[in-house]
Amino acid sequence: MMQNVLKHVRELQGHIEQLPVDKQAILTSSVEQLSVSLQELAAEFQSLLLSKQAQAKLERINSNLDIKVSQQAASIRHLEQQLEQSHILYRKVTQALTKGESRLQSLLQNSSDLMTIIEANGRIRDQNSIAAERMLGYNLEQRIGEFQDDFIHPDDLPVWQAYFAKLLKQPGIAPPVEYRKRHANGSWVYLEVIGNNLLHDSSINGIVINSRDITERKFSAAALEKSQKQIVNILEKITDGFYVLNRQWQFTYLNAKAEQSWQRGRQELIGKNIWDEFPDTADTIFSKQFYRAVSENVNVKFEGYYPQLNIWFEVEAYPSEEGLSVFFQNITDRKNTEDALRASESRYRILSQMTSDFAYSFKVLPDNTWACEWMTEAFTKITGYTPQEIATSGGLQFDCIHPDDLEMLVEQMQLRSSSRKEVSEYRIVTKSGEIRWLWDCRQVVWDEVENRAVGLYGACQDITQHKLVQAKLCETNQVLQGLIKALPLAVVGVDSNALVTVWNSAAERVFGWKESEVVGELLPIVPSDENVDFYAMFQSELAGETQVARESRRRRKDGSSIDVCIWTAPMRDAEGLTSGSIKIVSEISEVNGMEENTGWLQSRRDRLEPFWARYVKLPAGMKNLQTT
C-alpha cells in the first residue's frame, strides 16, 4: 500500500511540472513535505516489522496511516481540481493577452500616423514599420538605433532640437510642432509631430513621437494662397476702381485704380472713415445710397458727381456681413459726351443716354439690307474695319459678328414690331482675326406707315476684359471646389431644407456614405435623439450665425456613433441671402492633444476663405465660389 501511495505522489509531481512557474512553487513545497512524511512513516513501519511484540502497535499505526493517507489523497484530489481550474484560467488569460498584443501590433502597423519610441539620447528604439515605409520610404532596419533628427531639413533642425529639449525636461504631452523630413526618394515631407515623454513609465521608458504627414495640406494651403494672390492681381488690374468698407465705414482695402482716381494712397486711407476723409460726400447721393444698401441689404447702382475732384462716378455697391464692397468708374468723359450730344440733333440725343466706346447709325433699306450712315473713330480701333468697309459690305452683322452669335441677332431683328431699345452681348471677329466681346445698346427707329424698322442707332462697349475676369473667377471657383474635395476634414453642405449639397471624400471616410448616396437627400448623420439640438443650431445658422468648435454626437452609416467637433457658417447665394449652411466636421480624437485647437482650426478656416469672398459680389453662375 505504501508503494501505491508513493506512486500517486510521483504522478502528482508530474502534473505539477505542467503548471505555470508561480503555481508550481506553491504546490511543489506541499508535495515535498508530504513525500518526506510518507518516507518517515515507511521507515518507522520497517522498524516495527522487526519486533513481533510490536505487531499490535503496527496494526494500529497502519490503521491510522490508512486514515491519514485517505485524507491526504482527498486533499490531493482537491488540489488537482484547483490546479486544473487554474491551468484553464491561465490558458484563457494567455490567449487573451496574445490576442490583445496582436491587435495592438496590427493597429500600430496599419495606423496612418507614424509612431516612434526614442531613447533619452535621441536614438530610435522602435517604429511601426509600415507607416515609416509608406510615409518616408525607409524600412525598420534602416532606422532602428539611428537618431530621430536624421534627415530633418536643416532649416527646421533647431525647431526639433528645442522641442526635444523641452520634452526631456517635462513629462507628458507637448504641443504639436511641424518640420520637414527627407523622403528616401530625396523629396521633403511635411510632418506634424506630437511628443509624449513617458520615460517615467516603466512599460515604455521612452519618448513616444506621433508623426502625421501634412504635405498635402501644406501644398493645398500654398495653392490656395496662390489663388488668393491671383484674385488680388485681378482686382489690382481691372479698369474699375474698387474698395471695401467695414461696418464702421472704415476702409479695409482699395485697389490701384481707386488710388489713381482719388489721388491718395492706400496707406493714407486704410482704417480711416470714408465720411471723415471725403466730407464732401456726406449728405449726398453717395452716403444715401451706401446707407440704403447696408440698411436694406440690397445692391445699389447709381451715378454721382464729386465736386472736389470735378469727377462723375458710376458706382455699384454690394452689402455683406462685413460691410460694403464698392466698384466705381470715372464716367466724366461719358457725361461730357452726353452733354454735347444733347445739344446735337435727335440721333445724338439718343446716343447721349448710352454708355459707349463707339457709336454708330445704320439705315435699314426696303430690301432689308443695311447702309452705314456714320460711325465713331473708336470703331476702327476696336474692330480693325473702317466705316467705309462696313458701308460697302451690306451691314455690320455680316462682316464682324461671330458666326455662333449671328443667329441670335437675326432672331432679334425678326421679332421687331415697334420702336424700342435693345441690349445684347455678342462676339465679333476683328479684321486681324481676334475675337472680342461687345455690349451693344441700340435704338430701333420704326416706321408705322411702312410697318418696318427703317433705322438703327447704337453704341457699343468693349467688354472683353470683363469677360476675361469672369472666366478667371470661374477658373478660381473650380480650384476652390477641388480644394474642398482634398481637405482632410469632412466638409458637408446643406441647403435651407437640410438637403445635402456638398459632401467631400473626407465626409465619405468619416461617416461611411458615398457622395452619390447623400447629395439631394436629407442629412443622414444626425441621430434621432440629437434632432432637436441640430435643428435649433441649424435655424441659427440660417439666421446668419456661425458655430465654432461645437461638440456633438453624429451617426455613421453602420449605425455607430461618433463624437465630433463642428464648425459651421451660413452659405449665401448671389443676392447675399442665406441659402444653407456649410459644416466642417472633425472627429474628437483628431482634435484631442492639440492646444488651442479652436483657434488653430479657426485660423485654418480663415486661410481657406479668400478675403474677397466676403466683399466681392459674384455673378449668379458662380454661387459656389462665394459660399466655399
Image (cartoon, helix red, strand yellow):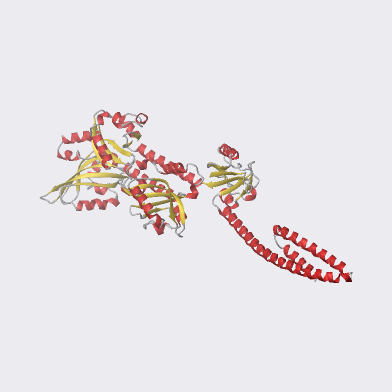
Q: Find residue 95 and report its image quarter.
A: bottom right
Residues 407 and 355: in front is 355
Spot occupied by residue 100 in the image (x, y as percentages of width and height): 59, 57
Left or right of 21 on screen, residue 152: left
The residue at 60%/57% (across/down) is 102
* Quarter of the rendering containing residue 432: top left
Q: Is residue 401 rendered to the left or right of residue 133?
A: left
In the rendered view, tell whether residue 253 sits above or below residue 497: above
Residue in view at x 62 percent, y 57 percent? 97
Return the residue nearer the eye: 129 or 167: 167
Q: Is residue 469 visible?
A: yes
338 displayed left or right of 470? left
Query: Which residue is at a point 50% across and 42% down the rendered structure image?
Result: 595
| Image quarter in which the N terminus is found | bottom right
Residue 394 is situated, as x and y percent measured from the top left of the image, at 22, 48
Residue 158 is situated, as x and y percent measured from the top left of the image, at 57, 36
What count of labels does the image hold? 0
Residue 628, visible in the rendered structure: no
Residue 474 % position (x, y) = 36, 47
Task: Pick whichever, 23 or 157, lies toward us.
Answer: 23
Describe residue 320's horizontal placement relative to residue 554 as left or right.
left
Residue 354 to residue 538: above or below: above
Residue at the limit of the structure toward the left, as seen here: 449
